[in-house]
Amino acid sequence: MQQPLLTGNSARTTTDEVIKNIDLTGKTAIITGGAAGLGLETTKTLANAGATIIIPVRNPDKVKLSLAGIPNVELYPASFDLSDRDSINSFSQWFKKNYQKLEILINSAGIMATPLSYDSLGNELQIATNYLGHYFLTKALLPELKQANGARVVHLTSRAHWFSPFHFEDPNFTHTPYDKWVAYGQSKTAVSLFSVALDELYKKDNIRSFAVHPGSIVTNLSHNLTDEELSAMGAINKNGDRGYDSYNNEHKTIKEGAATIVWCATSPQLAGYGGVYCENGDIAPLATDDSNQNRVGVKPWAIDKGTALKLWEETPHLFK
């Protein structure tokens, strides 16, 4: 399935180009992390195309200004925390009381390269936030996704999945020395595998699932990194600010980074497809060459169907 479609999109394609001529009037979308960075750009794009956007965030009052002026947006009134199972349940119950179906779910919120910490149940925080929270949220919303009869679920993964496969034997670093990048990579591999399993299990219900690598974009996601770390990654510009001086297939603006998210959520080019990893507005190639310094494409361990279904089934037992 990892065969590019030759869509005509590229790393320079923006959200405005992807959404052109697409009408989302009458459709409902949930976007976690929808009030900042890539999530905010996705919110603006889908809302301006007519969709009703539901946004759950940790601090609703704090983000009202960033959402001001965007049409068709409803902010979940309570605090929402992906690492808190009760918070996820409260939100899903609120949504069910107010909406009957869900056409688009975009699992965009996440954290990156954090110091070792745990959620209230004892799960490593990066895997708890990036993967577990969205796993339980998506499962809770399956009835509404089925009711849409044509739903799409988009999961934000990352090129960082190259850093690590999923470690079934010790996903919480209970016995393994903690490395923040390995932990981040494992969480993004888990996200990609989750996307594969969801599509395999529920395509019969007309739910299709996509994993997206948006590119490298300097947003608040990098707030845990020092300027020295970002400089080593080429993410400090000539003025000494966090950002890039130039852009390429990997380094992108926010509009370019969010374009693949919007494409996976709405494009008719993906009709009949699902369970694939996408980048640069197309299905990404399979990456089997470890000498590929640009890390183009997706590693086999992040899209293996058997591993994906195993993770889906074992997640409630692997984690607390």
Image: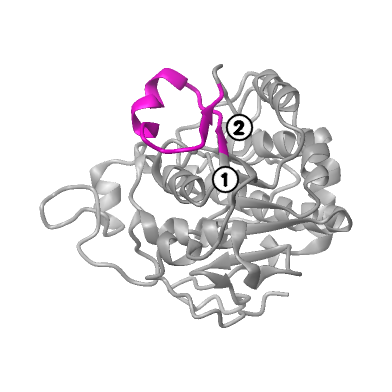
Report the quarter where the C terminus lies: top right
Which secondary structure lies at badge 1? loop
Q: Relative to residue 103, is residue 10 drawn left or right?
A: left
Determine the CA span between mark 2 and mark 1: 35 Å
Give the camera-side residue of 216 and 39: 39
Give the camera-side residue of 139 and 34: 34
Q: Which residues, given as a range, are shown in magenta?
A: 53-76
Residue 66, magenta (yes or no): yes
Q: Residue at x 17, y 47 (%)?
A: 241
> Dot 2: few (<14), some (14–19), or many (≥20) neighbours within 10 Å?
many
Q: Report if the CB atoms under discs 2 and 1 are less than 8 Å apart.
A: no
Q: Amino acid at mark 1?
A: Ala
Report the quarter where the N terminus lies: bottom right
Specify the label residue 116 is tagged with: none
Which secondary structure lies at badge 2? loop
Q: Relative to residue 248, is residue 122 drawn left or right?
A: right
5 relative to 53, above or below: below
Q: Which residue is mark 2?
A: 124
Outermost residue, left side: 239
Q: Residue at x 33, y 50 (%)?
A: 218
Outermost residue, bottom side: 6
Q: Position of residue 231 (x, y in %)?
A: 24, 53
Q: Amino acid at mark 2?
A: Glu
Q: Which residue is mark 1?
A: 51
**Quarter holding residue 52:** top right
Q: Position of residue 159 (x, y in %)?
A: 51, 60
Earlier in the chain: of badge 2 and badge 1, it is 1
Q: Residue at x 71, y 69 (%)?
A: 271
Q: Relative to residue 141, is residue 133 drawn left or right?
A: left
